[in-house]
Each structure stands twice: as structure tokens, then as C-alpha cells.
Image: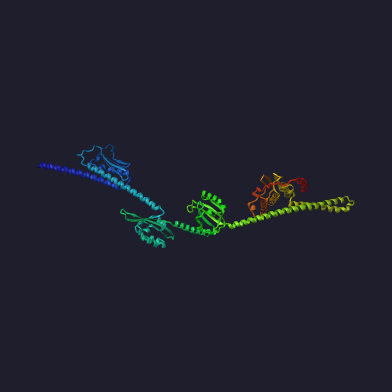
């Protein structure tokens, strides 16, 4: 019995020791789990640092901590106890995180793994590393989710705090605002704290004319969202237009538990719309009240729109014109021109063309229209060719009458100039032939009397008479020179006797002797293909040009050049004076220049005048050749010498 009691006592002691050893192992496991919990639930640092802390507590939880080594891996991060590379008999627990990162916890023994009989805690050890791996995976997933949530919240905060619109969130009935972005303070001019503390602040900020409408709308706000436009009144007195949109936020059960929205300040857009409406009304009034008419046409000429002022121009109402083609109402003689313009317009977007054409009035008459066509086919707001036109029939009639009157005046002027030249020629001939001959005869008679007296015997009594005769002879010479000058000014005989070329040279010589200005001729022509009227006009233009040079040019030299080809005669007169100005060329008081141009026009020619400051003036006369040469016979040739002697 005593032996049995000893055996029982030993068994009990052995069981107690086993229980104590088992309890100690459990305490180590719980201590390790508690330490791991503190690490994983504490502030998360770098993943490598967390793994280093965890791997340090794993051996202490094993049955033989002094012979146990461990390694923990998570993604690219790894932590291991010393001498892990020498371990054998490894136990492994693997896991995968929510974002796909592979992980594992491994333990081993550097002195050999105990047998089953010596290692009763092998099952607990596997359970331990499985538990630690689950804890690490769960902690990492939670940390990853928290970081994602934090990043999402940061992005949301950045978004709401930097957008110009006001993001807000409130209760489903919008009777309490839970959040408003910072833009609320810049748009409403009030603090967010005042909005959070008293919802009535929002109601009071609504413009009095819109307040009741907004309150009634929010009282029945639809759960699926809303859009609302209203005005607010800021504390500084400014009125702002707001466009507010709300949308529901549901929980997992589908119940709407929040209402979020965006409130946008659309004041500038409202003002732009109001300005646009005002501008549209203004231009509509201008179009409807204008005496000009406007039509919009397609590229084929079909009329798509006609302004209300159309009846004032064409008699047709806008409805009567719409649908017609512009070619149907344009005069047949003008359709080719219109077709060219249409082709050019369609091929060149944006260009405009001015044109005049005849268009049929509703009463059947043809009216002259002046207008502008502009291609706005590619302009989205227009999409057509725009015709802006007005009735110029009255102006055309006035122009025709003026043109007829001008032609009559020019014909009258031509007749007057011709009559003047003819009368001048007649008077010159009579002065030269009649008065000149009489004066010459008187001079010869006086010279005969002087000879007779000089042979008389009593010279003492005849001295006073001879003196008187000498004075009369000098006066007679002077009178003859005056008669010759007057006759030459009325109609230079050299122009009729020798032609235009010699007449121009003679006039230049006379001008040089009288004024002292040096005149030089280049390219003198003596057989010009001009009619008598053309030669006379060119000569008078040359005289007027020299007169203008003397009066205004302040020149010292004059050069003129005569040129002729088969079709045209050109006379170029150049001086070295101060140069004519643009104002002088176009001035209403430039009668001399106007007379030069008018003389040239009457013979089918032109006069061009140009000048450069300090470099003189150039006058160019162009006349188309007449096709017939002036008569040159033996009688004229025989008179050249006598004429030159008379001029000397």
C-alpha cells in the first residue's frame, strides 16, 4: 500500500509538473500575443520596423526560446533573428494581404527539432504562428484601408476647399447643414460657423423676392435630388445669383440619410445673359427699324431669312421672300456677276464683297440696290451668307443726271475754249495783219519823211521836227512789239506755222528771257501726230505749268521732255523747286491745275502731277495720238524764215 501510495504520489507530482510546465508555456504564448497586439495596434511606423519588433517576440513564445529563430516577410520587407540561416526543421505560416502582398512567418531550431514525446506544444506552436500571421495580415489590411481612407479624405478636402463652387452636406430635409466648403464664405460673405450654429442664417441670406419660393421648394425637396436657382443678399449689400444642385446619399439599406450638393455663383453668367438679351433687343430694334434690309441665304442662293425692313426696300414681306432664290429677283444682266460673287464667297469663308445690282420690286419695277455680301456659313450662330443692302435708285438717277449735266458742261466748256481759241486766232490775225501792217506802214512813212527832211537845205529849222519824228519812231517800235506780244499771247503764230514741238521750244525760250529761269528741252519732236485741238490744248497746259512754276515752285531750272510712240504723246515737265503738296494738288482753289486736267480730258488725255518735298514737281501730260498729221506744204516751209525774223 505504501508503495502504491508512493507511485500515486509520483504520478501526481509528475502531472503537476506537467501542468505547471504547460501553464508556463501558455503564459509565454499569451505574453507574446499581448506584445504583438500592442505592436500591431499601436502607431504604425514603417513596415520593416513593425516586422523587426514582431520577429523579436516570436522566440520567447516557443518551448525552447534559446534554440528558436524566426523570420517574418511581408511583400518586399523582411525581418529575421540572428542565425536564422542556420536553422533547421522550419515551421511556416503564409498569408496574402487584401492588396495582394504575400507574407509569411517562419520559426526553426538551431539545435534540432525535439521529437513528439519531447515536444508536446508543437500543435500550440503552429497555432501561435498561424494566429500571429492572421494578426499581421489583419493589421496590415486595416492600416492600408486607413491610409486609403485618409488619402481619400485628403483628396476630398483638397477638392472641396479649392473649388469655386460651394460643396455642402445636410440632413435629408435640408433643415440642418452639416458641412459647407470654404467657398461658402467668399460667395455668401458669411462664416461657416454661423451656418452650422443656426440654419436660419441660410434662409435669411436669400433675397426677399426669392425667399418664400425657396422655402416652399425645400419643404418638399425630392429625395432623388433637385436643381434650384435663386438670389442671395450678402451682408455688404451685393446681390449674387446662385445655382444649387442637390443629390441624395444612401446607406447600405438604401435609405437616404444625407443630402449633398454644389452651389455655384452664376452672377457673371446672369449678367452676361442679360447683356446679351439687351444687345439682341438693341440689334433687333436696329434691324427692324433700319432703312437697310438684311437677308440670310444658303450657298445656293436660297433666301432663309429677310428682315422686317424688307418691304421698305423691295415691297415684298419677309414671308414672301423666304424660300425664293436671289437669282429669281436679280436682273438677268446682273446674274452672271452675282454668280461670280457667290462662287467667290462660298470658296472663301469670312470674306465680304460689295456689289451693286438691279433687283425686281414687288410692283414689277427694277430697283438699284447697293450692299455687302459676307460669308458666315461657318459661323455657328449664323450659318448663312449675309446680305446687307439698301435702295440706291434715287442716287443712281441723280448720278445719271449729274453725268449728263457734266457732259453738257464739258461740251459747253469745250465749245467755249474752242470759240476762245478761234476768236483769239482771229483777233491775233487782225492785230498782226491789220494793225501791225498799219503801224509798219506808218513807220516806213516816218522814215521817208526823216530822209526827206535830212536832205533839206535849212537844217536849223528842221531839228525839232526830226527830234519829234525820232520819238514817234521809237514809240512806233514799242507799239509794234506790244502788238506782236498781244497777238502771240492770243494765238502764237508759231503753233500754226511750225507745229507743237517748235511752239513749246519757243514758249520756253520766251519764258526764260522774261523770268530768268533756265529752261532745257530734251528729246524735241518736230513732226507730232496730233490734231490742231490736241496741239492747242497741250500748248495751253504747258503755258499754265510754266506759270505755276513761276508763281509757286521757287525753282531755278525747268526741264521738259517730249516723247511719242504709235499710240500716245507724252510731255513731261520737271522743276527743281520745293515740290507740290497733296493739299495743293487736291485743293479747291487750285483752279490752274483743274483747268489743265479739264483741257486734257476734252482731248482724251490726262495730266498727272506728283511732287517730293525739296525735290521738285513733275507734270506728265498724256494724249492719245489722233492718227492724222498736220499739213506741211511748201508755202509753210517758205514762211519759216520770215516768221523767225518777225519773232526776233
Q: Could you tell whether 381 is left or right of 527 in the image?
A: left
Colour style of the rendered protein structure: rainbow
Mark yes or no: residue 43 visible: no
Camera-side residue: 595 or 404? 404
Pick out the residue farthest to the right.
457
- Of residues 636 and 508, which is closer to you in this image? 636
Residue 407 at x, y percent in the picture: 65, 55
Query: In screen coordinates, is 256 left or right of 566?
Result: left
* Image quarter in which the N terminus is found: top left
Residue 205 location in percent, x, y? 40, 60
x and y, in percent, of residue 283 in the image = 50, 58
Q: Is residue 237 left or right of residue 486?
A: left
Residue 143: % across, % down: 32, 47
Name which residue lies at 69% across and 54% down.
415
Q: For residue 248, which quarter of the picture? A: bottom left
Can see residue 85? yes
Q: Is residue 419 above or below residue 105?
A: below
> Seen in the image, is 33 located left or right of residue 375?
left
Q: Residue at x 20, y 41 (%)?
A: 120
Amino acid at each position: 500500500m505504501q508503495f502504491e501510495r508512493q507511485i500515486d504520489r509520483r504520478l501526481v507530482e509528475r502531472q503537476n509538473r506537467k501542468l505547471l510546465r504547460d501553464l508556463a508555456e501558455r503564459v509565454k504564448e499569451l505574453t507574446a500575443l499581448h506584445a504583438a497586439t500592442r505592436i500591431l495596434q499601436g502607431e504604425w511606423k514603417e513596415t520593416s520596423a513593425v516586422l523587426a519588433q514582431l520577429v523579436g517576440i516570436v522566440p520567447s513564445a516557443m518551448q525552447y526560446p534559446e534554440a528558436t529563430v524566426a523570420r517574418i516577410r511581408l511583400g518586399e520587407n523582411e525581418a529575421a533573428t540572428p542565425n536564422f540561416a542556420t536553422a533547421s526543421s522550419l515551421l511556416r505560416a503564409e498569408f496574402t494581404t487584401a492588396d495582394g502582398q504575400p507574407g509569411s512567418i517562419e520559426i526553426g531550431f538551431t539545435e534540432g527539432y525535439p521529437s513528439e514525446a519531447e515536444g508536446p506544444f508543437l500543435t500550440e506552436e503552429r497555432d501561435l504562428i498561424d494566429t500571429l500571421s492572421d494578426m499581421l495580415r489583419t493589421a496590415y489590411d486595416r492600416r492600408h484601408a486607413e491610409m486609403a481612407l485618409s488619402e481619400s479624405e485628403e483628396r476630398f478636402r483638397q477638392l472641396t476647399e479649392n473649388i469655386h463652387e460651394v460643396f455642402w452636406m445636410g440632413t435629408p430635409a435640408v433643415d440642418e447643414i452639416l458641412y459647407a466648403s470654404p467657398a461658402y464664405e467668399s460667395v455668401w460673405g458669411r462664416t461657416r460657423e454661423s451656418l452650422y450654429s443656426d440654419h436660419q442664417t441660410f434662409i435669411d441670406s436669400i433675397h426677399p423676392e426669392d425667399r418664400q419660393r425657396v422655402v416652399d421648394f425645400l419643404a418638399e425637396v425630392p429625395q432623388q435630388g433637385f436643381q434650384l436657382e435663386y438670389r442671395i443678399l450678402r451682408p455688404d449689400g451685393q446681390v449674387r445669383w446662385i445655382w444649387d444642385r442637390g443629390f441624395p446619399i444612401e446607406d447600405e439599406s438604401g435609405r437616404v440619410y444625407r443630402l449633398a450638393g454644389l452651389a455655384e455663383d452664376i452672377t457673371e453668367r446672369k449678367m452676361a445673359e442679360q447683356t446679351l438679351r439687351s444687345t439682341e433687343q438693341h440689334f433687333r430694334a436696329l434691324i427692324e427699324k433700319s432703312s437697310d434690309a438684311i437677308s440670310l441665304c444658303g450657298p445656293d442662293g436660297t433666301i432663309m431669312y429677310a428682315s422686317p425692313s424688307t418691304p421698305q426696300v423691295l415691297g415684298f414681306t419677309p414671308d414672301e421672300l423666304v424660300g425664293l432664290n436671289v437669282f429669281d429677283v436679280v436682273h438677268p444682266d446682273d446674274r452672271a456677276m452675282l454668280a461670280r460673287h457667290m462662287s467667290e464667297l462660298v470658296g472663301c469663308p469670312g470674306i465680304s464683297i460689295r456689289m451693286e445690282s438691279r433687283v425686281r420690286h414687288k410692283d414689277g419695277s427694277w430697283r438699284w440696290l447697293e450692299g455687302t455680301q459676307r460669308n458666315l456659313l461657318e459661323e455657328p450662330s449664323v450659318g448663312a451668307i449675309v446680305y446687307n443692302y439698301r435702295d440706291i435708285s434715287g442716287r443712281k438717277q441723280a448720278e445719271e443726271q449729274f453725268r449728263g449735266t457734266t457732259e453738257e458742261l464739258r461740251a459747253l466748256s469745250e465749245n467755249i475754249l474752242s470759240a476762245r481759241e478761234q476768236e483769239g486766232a482771229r483777233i491775233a490775225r487782225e492785230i498782226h495783219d491789220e494793225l501791225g501792217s498799219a503801224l509798219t506802214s506808218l513807220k516806213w512813212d516816218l522814215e521817208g519823211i526823216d530822209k526827206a527832211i535830212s536832205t533839206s537845205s535849212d537844217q536849223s529849222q528842221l531839228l525839232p521836227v526830226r527830234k519829234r519824228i525820232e520819238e514817234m519812231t521809237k514809240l512806233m517800235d514799242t507799239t509794234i512789239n506790244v502788238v506782236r506780244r498781244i497777238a502771240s499771247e492770243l494765238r502764237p503764230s508759231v503753233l500754226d506755222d511750225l507745229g507743237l514741238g517748235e511752239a513749246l521750244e519757243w514758249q520756253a525760250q520766251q519764258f526764260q528771257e522774261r523770268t530768268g529761269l533756265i529752261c532745257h528741252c530734251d528729246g524735241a519732236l518736230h513732226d507730232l501726230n496730233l490734231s490742231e485741238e490736241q496741239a492747242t490744248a497741250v500748248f495751253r497746259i504747258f503755258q499754265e505749268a510754266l506759270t505755276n512754276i513761276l508763281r509757286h515752285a521757287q525753282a531755278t531750272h525747268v526741264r521738259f521732255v517730249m516723247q511719242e510712240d504709235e499710240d500716245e504723246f507724252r510731255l513731261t515737265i520737271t522743276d527743281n523747286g520745293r515740290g507740290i503738296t497733296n493739299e495743293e494738288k487736291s485743293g479747291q482753289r487750285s483752279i490752274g491745275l483743274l483747268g489743265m486736267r479739264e483741257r486734257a480730258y476734252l482731248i482724251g488725255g490726262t495730266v498727272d502731277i506728283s511732287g517730293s518735298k525739296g525735290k521738285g514737281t513733275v507734270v506728265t501730260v498724256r494724249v492719245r495720238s489722233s492718227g492724222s498729221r498736220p499739213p506741211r506744204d511748201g508755202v509753210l516751209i517758205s514762211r519759216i524764215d520770215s516768221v523767225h525774223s518777225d519773232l526776233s
